[in-house]
């Protein structure tokens, strides 16, 4: 029995859905409404004390942290393999997935919330999350509400642009991030480039044709269509589109892009 607790637009959950879809593993998907507070339900907190998605439950095994979950999926369901066969390739793959936890996820949160998602948070949600996560959360939220004027925004944008240029350099060496094989690294980055696309910040990667081509090949995979595209939230897309377009001139200036 395999159950995935997830959310349609969560980048962390999207990469787990993608791994399960590539494997064709049957599972029960339980969608968590993060704005309604499903992640704070006491029963869920027992599985995931941080009150975040995703969480994978496989029989009596509970796995949290999306990078760890995807490695677990590849170990528990070996076909088709999503890790390179050799040690050097696996190290390279983990270099990519580690950088998500080391900065790319946080930068994506800062950018997405500053530009678009903070508009969805009611005072009640902010209050509940502050109770759960502590006063530092409220302080951070007040900064996010400043939009592109959030003092953390320029560094977050620069981090995401570095992600794109790192990908571009890697893709000069082969069709996928770790050479000739599609791996958990490609799966992990698919939601992040998708987020830039949804925010209409595609100007960050369209100037790098190798990344643009990688994204086209990712989107063409049946797993992307079933696990991501068909589940995009119809309310979030226009919000990201509208707010992202308005922010783009500032982003361009910050990166001194032509
Ligand atoms: N490092 C964790 C991060 C999980 C995380 O923060 N998930 C976000 C969605 S991408 C979440 O559940 N947020 C809950 C909230 O907004 O209250 C992972 O990779 O699984």
Image (cartoon, rainbow, N blue to C red):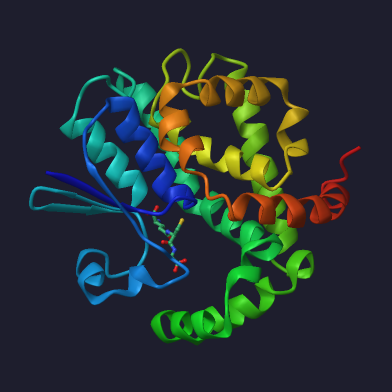
The quadrant of the picture showing ligand 1 is bottom left
Give the number of callouts.
Answer: 0
Q: Does residue 140 sit above or below 177 in this rendering? A: below
Identify the residue at horizontal 67%, vertical 25% (top origin): 212
Q: Does residue 69 sit above or below 125 in this rendering? A: above
* Quadrant (top left, top right, bottom left, bottom right) of the C terminus: top right
Q: Does residue 227 sit above or below 104 in this rendering? A: above
Residue that lies at the very extreme toward the right in this rendered image:
258
* Quadrant (top left, top right, bottom left, bottom right) of the N terminus: top left
Where residue 132 sits, quadrant-wise, is bottom left
Q: Nearer the viewer, residue 157 or 48?
A: 48
Residue 131 at x, y percent in the picture: 42, 87
Where residue 84 sits, quadrant-wise, is top left
Q: Nearer the viewer, residue 163 or 197?
A: 197
Residue 76 at x, y percent in the picture: 16, 34
Identify the residue at horizontal 60%, vertical 82% (top origin): 139
Residue that lies at the very extreme toward the front in this rendered image:
234
Identify the residue at horizontal 52%, vertical 79% (top origin): 137
């Amino acid at each position: 029995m395999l159950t995935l607790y997830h959310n349609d637009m969560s980048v962390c959950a999207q990469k787990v859905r993608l791994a399960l879809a590539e494997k064709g593993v049957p599972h029960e998907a339980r969608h968590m409404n993060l704005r309604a507070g499903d992640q704070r339900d006491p029963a869920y907190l027992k599985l995931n004390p941080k009150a975040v998605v995703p969480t994978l439950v496989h029989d009596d095994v509970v796995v949290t942290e999306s990078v760890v979950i995807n490695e677990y999926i590849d170990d528990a369901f070996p076909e088709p393999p999503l890790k390179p066969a050799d040690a050097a390739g696996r190290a390279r793959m983990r270099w990519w997935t580690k950088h998500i936890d080391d900065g790319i996820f946080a930068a994506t949160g800062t950018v997405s919330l500053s530009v678009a998602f903070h508009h969805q948070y009611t005072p009640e949600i902010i209050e509940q999350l502050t109770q759960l996560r502590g006063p530092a959360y409220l302080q951070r939220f007040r900064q996010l509400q400043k939009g592109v004027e959030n003092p953390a925004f320029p560094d977050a944008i620069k981090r995401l642009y570095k992600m794109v240029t790192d990908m571009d350099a890697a893709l000069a060496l082969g069709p996928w991030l770790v050479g000739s094989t599609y791996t958990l690294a490609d799966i992990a980055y698919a939601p992040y480039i998708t987020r830039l696309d949804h925010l209409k910040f595609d100007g960050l990667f369209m100037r790098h044709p190798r990344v643009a081509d990688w994204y086209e090949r990712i989107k063409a995979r049946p797993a992307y269509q079933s696990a991501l595209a068909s589940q995009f939230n119809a309310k979030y897309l226009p919000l990201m589109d509208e707010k992202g377009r308005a922010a783009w001139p500032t982003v361009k200036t910050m990166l001194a892009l032509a």
